[in-house]
Image (cartoon, rainbow, N blue to C red):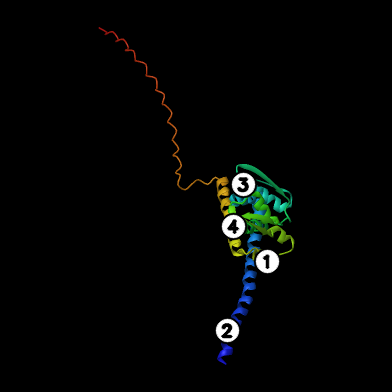
């Protein structure tokens, strides 16, 4: 009996692990859907330009420049052609590609870029070229390492996987990246947009800074009093003659 009991424990633990993994992934899927919806609500409330600028700032380093990041955000939303530039060995290189699929909502655009960023970082690429970005999004090969240690790695592409109908949780699992980290990044981006909007709104209203003491208003000078004219001197009347 003891032997049977010991054999069952690993089996039960294994079954528990398999049963737990989908639950954890489902929770992450729900969380990322909620954050994505909030992100899209912010876009509707504050305007797409505000959200695009915020995302361009967030992904500027990853994309190589704010212009590249802005081009990616716009192209991924519309499905239109994206043109990226990067400098390789002192030469400016241009890469143009059409996204494998367009993405509905700014939240999904953020998620796709965050997943691509994680996948390339896992390969040791933190400053990708335009060609690396294309491969991470649409699928293709990248060169990892240098010299004799260089090797070619094939990427499936975040957008290509999305176009095939896979959910974000499934895509993250295939890419072997953390969806929870993307949820955190998306939540932080939401707060960043809200914080900047509050600052701009307060500035527009014209609230004075608490640390600034307004200047005292000088009182107007009193009007100069006009001197009254001096009274004329009285002329002495002549004395009347004495009567004898």
Q: Earlier in the sequence, mark 4 or mark 3?
A: 3
Is 15 located above or below residue 209 in the figure?
Answer: below
Give the answer, above or below, for where 220 lies relative to 52.
Answer: above
For this orientation, the residue located farthest to the bottom is 1
Circle nearer the N terminus (2, 4): 2
**Element type where label 3 sits in the image:** helix
Q: Earlier in the sequence, mark 2 or mark 1?
A: 2
Closer to us: 63 or 53: 63
Query: Do tag 3 and tag 1 residues touch (Cβ < 8 Å)?
Result: no
Q: How far apart are marks 3 and 1 (CA)?
A: 29 Å
Q: Are marks 3 and 2 in contact (CB under 8 Å)?
A: no
* Residue shown at 60% from the left, 64% from the top: 178
Q: Name the residue under label 3.
A: 66
Q: Where is residue 42 in the image (x, y as percent from the top left)?
A: 64, 55
**Residue, x 72% and y 53% (percent of image)?**
99
Question: Does residue 8 appear anywhere in the picture?
Answer: yes
Tag shown at residue 9 = 2
Q: State which mark lies toward you, 1 or 4.
A: 4
Q: Which mark lies nearer to you, 3 or 2?
A: 2
Mark drawn on residue 121: 4
Across and down, in percent, residue 28 comes to 62, 67
Percent x, y for residue 175?
65, 63
Please, what secondary structure does the residue beneath circle 1 have? helix
The answer to whether the residue labelled 2 contacts the one labelled 4, judged by CB atoms less than 8 Å apart, is no
What separation in Å lies between label 2 and label 1 (alpha carbons)?
29 Å
Which residue was labeled with disc 1? Answer: 170
Instruction: Indicate whether 12 appears above or below 25.
Output: below
As measured in the structure, the alpha-carbon distance from the residue carrying label 2 to the one carrying label 4 is: 38 Å
Labels 1 and 4 touching (C-beta < 8 A): no
Viewer-closest of 62 and 153: 153
């Amino acid at each position: 009996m003891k032997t049977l009991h010991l054999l069952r424990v690993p089996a039960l633990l294994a079954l528990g692990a398999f049963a737990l993994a989908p639950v954890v992934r489902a929770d992450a899927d729900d969380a990322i859907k909620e954050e994505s919806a909030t992100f899209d609500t912010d876009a509707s409330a504050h305007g797409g330009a505000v959200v695009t600028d915020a995302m361009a700032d967030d992904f500027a380093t990853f994309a190589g420049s704010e212009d590249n990041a802005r081009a990616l955000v716009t192209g991924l939303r519309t499905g239109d052609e994206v043109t990226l530039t990067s400098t390789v060995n002192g030469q400016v290189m241009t890469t143009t590609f059409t996204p494998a699929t367009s993405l509905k909502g700014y939240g999904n655009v953020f998620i796709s870029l965050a997943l691509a960023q994680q996948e390339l970082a896992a390969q040791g690429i933190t400053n990708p070229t335009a060609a690396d970005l294309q491969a991470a999004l649409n699928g293709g090969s990248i060169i990892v390492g240098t010299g004799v240690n260089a090797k070619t790695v094939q990427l499936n592409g975040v957008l290509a996987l999305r176009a095939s109908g896979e959910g974000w949780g499934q895509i993250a699992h295939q890419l072997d990246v953390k969806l929870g980290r993307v949820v955190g990044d998306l939540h932080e981006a939401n707060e960043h947009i809200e914080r900047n909007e509050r600052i701009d709104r307060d500035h527009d209203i014209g609230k004075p800074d608490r640390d600034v003491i307004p200047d005292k208003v000088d009182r107007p000078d009193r009007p100069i009093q006009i001197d009254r004219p001096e009274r004329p001197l009285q002329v002495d009347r002549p004395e009347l003659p004495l009567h004898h």
